[in-house]
C-alpha cells in the first residue's frame, strides 16, 4: 500500500471540498523535515493496531489564508479560529488515514486534535517509526502532511 499516494488523494479531497482550495503535491515525498519556523501544526494521535501520529504543518501565513477560505472570513492573525481550523483539518485527515490503515475502521482510535504553534520548533519522532512527509502547495503557499507509524 502506498500510503503517501493515499495521503495526497485525501488531502486533495478535503481541501477541495471543505476549504475550497486546490492543493498539489510539491516536490518529493521524504522521510525527514527541517525545523519549523513561524508555523502552526495540528496533531492527531493514532492508537490500536497501528500506533503513531498524523500532523499537518502550516506556515502562519498559509494557515491564516486557509482558515479564511475554510470559514469564509478575513483572518489576519493566529487566533482561536486558526487553531480550530488547523485542528479540524488534522482531524479530517486523521479520519482518512484511519480508514486507509484500518480495513473495518474499528481497530484504530484517534485522539482529539492538538495544536502547536511557535516561532521555531522541531517535530521529531521519539522512537523507531516509519515517517512519511508529504509536501503540498496551494494558492496560499506550501504546507506539509506528516505521518509517523511505529514499526
Image: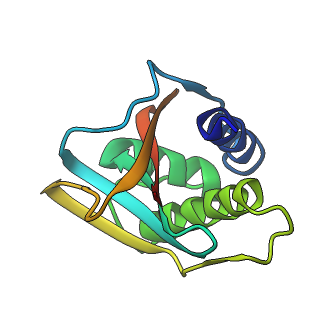
The reply to whether residue 72 is in sight is no
Q: Nearer the viewer, residue 25 or 108?
A: 108
Residue at 26% over, 56% down: 123
Q: Residue furthest top?
A: 27
Name above or below for residue 62 compared with residue 42.
above
Q: From the viewer's perspective, is 7 left or right of 100?
A: left
Q: From the viewer's perspective, is residue 43 above or below residue 146?
A: below
Residue 150 in percent (x, y) is at 45, 62
Find the residue positioned furthest to the front. 151
Residue drawn at point x = 33 percent, y = 61 percent: 78
Q: Position of residue 96 (x, y in %)?
A: 71, 56
- Determine which quarter of the picture holds residue 21: top right
Residue 16 occupies quadrant: top right
Q: Is residue 56 left or right of residue 79?
A: right
Total labels: the figure holds 0
Instruction: Relative to 6, say whether 105 is above or below.
Output: below
Q: Classify the position of the N terminus by image quarter.
A: top right
Is residue 8 at least partly visible in the picture?
Answer: yes
145 or 65, nearer to the observer: 145
Residue at the extreme left of the image, as rendered: 120
Name the residue: 49% across, 52% down: 74
Foreground: 119 or 130? 130
Give the colouring mode of the picture. Answer: rainbow
Which percent across, then down, holds residue 114?
Answer: 42, 75
Residue at x 63%, y 35% (from the top left corner)? 8
* Left or right position of 111 against 125: right
Residue 103, position as x, y percentages in the image: 83, 61
Q: Is residue 91 left or right of residue 32?
A: right
Amino acid at each position: 500500500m502506498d500510503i503517501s499516494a493515499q495521503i495526497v488523494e485525501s488531502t486533495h479531497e478535503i481541501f477541495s471540498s471543505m476549504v475550497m482550495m486546490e492543493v498539489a503535491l510539491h516536490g518529493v515525498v521524504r522521510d525527514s523535515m527541517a525545523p519549523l519556523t513561524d508555523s502552526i501544526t495540528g496533531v492527531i494521535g493514532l492508537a490500536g493496531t497501528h500506533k503513531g501520529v498524523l500532523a499537518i504543518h502550516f506556515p502562519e501565513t498559509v494557515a491564516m489564508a486557509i482558515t479564511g477560505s475554510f470559514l469564509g472570513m478575513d483572518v489576519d492573525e493566529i487566533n482561536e479560529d486558526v487553531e480550530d481550523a488547523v485542528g479540524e483539518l488534522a482531524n479530517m485527515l486523521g479520519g482518512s488515514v484511519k480508514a486507509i490503515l484500518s480495513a473495518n475502521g474499528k481497530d484504530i482510535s484517534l485522539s482529539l486534535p492538538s495544536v502547536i504553534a511557535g516561532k521555531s520548533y522541531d517535530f521529531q519522532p521519539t522512537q523507531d517509526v516509519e515517517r512519511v512527509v508529504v509536501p503540498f502547495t496551494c494558492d496560499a503557499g506550501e504546507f506539509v502532511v506528516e505521518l509517523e507509524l511505529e514499526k
